[in-house]
Image: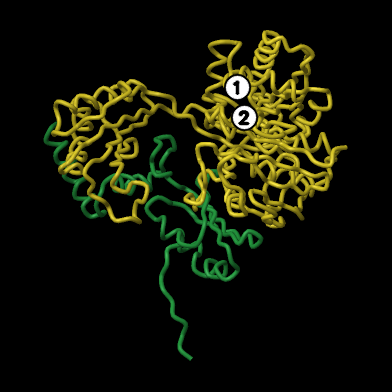
Amino acid sequence: MAAPKSRRVKLREFAFARSGDKGDGSNVGLFVRTGADYELIRKQVTAAAVKRHFRAICFGEVTRYEAPNMLALNFLLHGLALLELEVVRPIPAKAAAPAQKRARAGGPKQAKARTAARRRAAAKRR
Amino acid sequence: MRDKVLVGYGQGFWGDSILGPVRLVREGPIDYLALDYLAEVTMSIMQKLRGRNPKAGYATDFVAMLDRILPEIAKKGIKVIANAGGVNCGACLDAVLDLARRQGIRGLKVGIVEGDDVMARIPELLAAGEPLANMDDGRPLAAVQDRILSANVYIGAFAVAECLRQGAQIVIGGRLTDPALVGGPLIHEFGWRPTDWDKLAAGTMAGHIAECGAQCTGGNFSDWRQVKDFVRIGYPVIEASPDGTFVVTKHEGTGGLVTRETVISQLLYEMGDPRRYLGPDCTADFTSARIEQEGPDRVRLSDIRGAPATDTYKVSISYHDGFKASGQLVIAGPDAVAKARLCADIVFGRLALDGCTFTADEQCVELLGTGVCHAGIAPPADPPEVVLRLGVKCQDEGKVDRFGMEIVPLVTSGPPGVTGFAGGRPKATDIVGYWPALLKKDKVKTSVRVEVT
């Protein structure tokens, strides 16, 4: 028998999500409508996958909880820099460098080059 | 005992629409109107206001709202539960009594619940061996003790029920938990006892669903295209039964949507471990609930299980953590992104020229419109215009104010296409740090006072 056909889909095509503040980070709740879809997200949307997805903004652990009655997974993202839309929370030293990079469009390589260029320019001005 | 109690939730935070409570009172039946006005930062702002004026420090929006609908509330006999007292319940009580008298409403009973504000008691509590360590990282309170702006215990539903028992039609509290605004009326009406863990858990879940107002009736919902008539969105009404089951619904004819999905969305909001939702009155197991669509805009929850509460209250402490300022400019294309980057470099360059430097983690540079909210996920965009948002934070207020003066000059002394500067020079404002801690329950005494017009 041929293997069932599969295709990659975005979660937003069939799942729902809600997020809020939680301690030193945020949570992301994710849920679906059917048992089959729930099995799918339980298998594929692991804590590690979520951590990878948010690698640019989440600097701590990701914990996953299951709530089968809601066909839901709840992810706790610790050490989240909350997209820097607020300059409120102290950003740990480790996070400061990537925080700078993502303030820019472009990849980290360009950002690094820009930072270096800016330092040189600043030195010149002084 | 009634076999059904209707609790409308008309305000999810201080700043939510005044139409929420007004329309809940006018457009359908409710027995109780619950209103949440507090967030962590709110308490510190209120302490500051009270420091300047002993009659301030509560949510003035609450009194403005009552000014519109108190006669209808009094006539219909609707009871109001609000944590609008902030850090000055007594002043809020006086303002409401004054308002009722001005409106000629006689015999209105207004009560307050106090005991949540422990700011003045911190030295005493530390001396008694309560560490009040930071729940997130374990640091001892000594790290910020000289900079504390507010400290409030999250009070539960039984204090609200006691105030109702003493006859209050309007109950004003300080830091009552958001769910307690729903749980209090249910305990009062149904005679639930402190060991009725399952029922208390149901009250907690009902309150959690309703606590952000329209966020369970279609607001902020993933499938937003399905939501009809956002303009007239209905705020939630909890239709509760004595056995702990309840229906989430909204007034007939209002906009919005109540489905299994909109309710589950809100159940997951700010969720930690769904099996252990900790509150002052019980520990609720959100995974125990049966959640069913029983009709259009009606979702029933049943079978909810609870466990005993812990022996501690959560305390929300806020402290001064330096200063911040931010401002923004619109950078029109062509080459909007390149010009915006240059603008950021010019601002921090000129500040450095004047001896005012900020470290990398004290600076915030964002090019809104290029995918800032999807860092590392969406490919960076090159849009025809961007909003450049610049911010700084540090301990030195003078430096932060100096930063604010260097943004608008870009309009004439930077690259072309810089516009959209509005709102004046950014000024330094306090950064309010949040310090969650635990406190043994026997260290806290709540008290209730009811007065009549």
- Examine the image and state in which quarter residue B181 appears: top right
Question: What is chain A's hue in the picture?
Answer: green
Name the residue furthest bottom: A1
Asked whether, in this view, residue B391 is left or right of residue B27, the answer is left
- Numbered mark located on residue B21 in the image: 2
Q: Are marks 1 and 2 on the same chain?
A: yes
Q: Would residue B401 be visible to someone looking at this image?
A: no
As rendered, which of B243 and B284 lies closer to the eye? B243
Residue B65 is marked as 1
Residue B336 horizontal/vertical position (percent): 19, 41
Residue plotted at (14% across, 34% down): B415
Q: To which chain does the residue with label 2 belong?
A: B
At mark 2, the secondary structure is helix
- Say left or right for B167 vs B98: right
Q: Local crowd at mark 2 within 10 Å, few (<14), some, or many (≥20)? A: many
Residue type highlighted by circle 1: Met
Q: Nearer the viewer, residue B334 or A68?
A: B334
Q: Is residue B271 above or below residue B288?
A: above
Q: Is residue A21 above or below residue B397?
A: below
Q: Chain of mark 1?
A: B
**Hey, which quadrant is residue B340 in on the image?**
top left
- Tell me which label, 1 or 2, sits earlier in the chain: 2
Residue depicted at 55% across the width and 45% down the height? B218
Res B284 seen here: yes
Q: Element type at marker 1?
A: helix
The residue sitting at the left extreme is: A124
Q: Are marks 1 and 2 in contact (CB under 8 Å)?
A: yes
Task: Name the image quarter holding the C terminus of chain A.
Answer: top left
Question: Picture coordinates of residue B235 (x, y %)?
Answer: 61, 38
The residue type indicated by label 2 comes to: Pro
- Residue B284: which numbered mark, if any? none
Chain B's colour is yellow
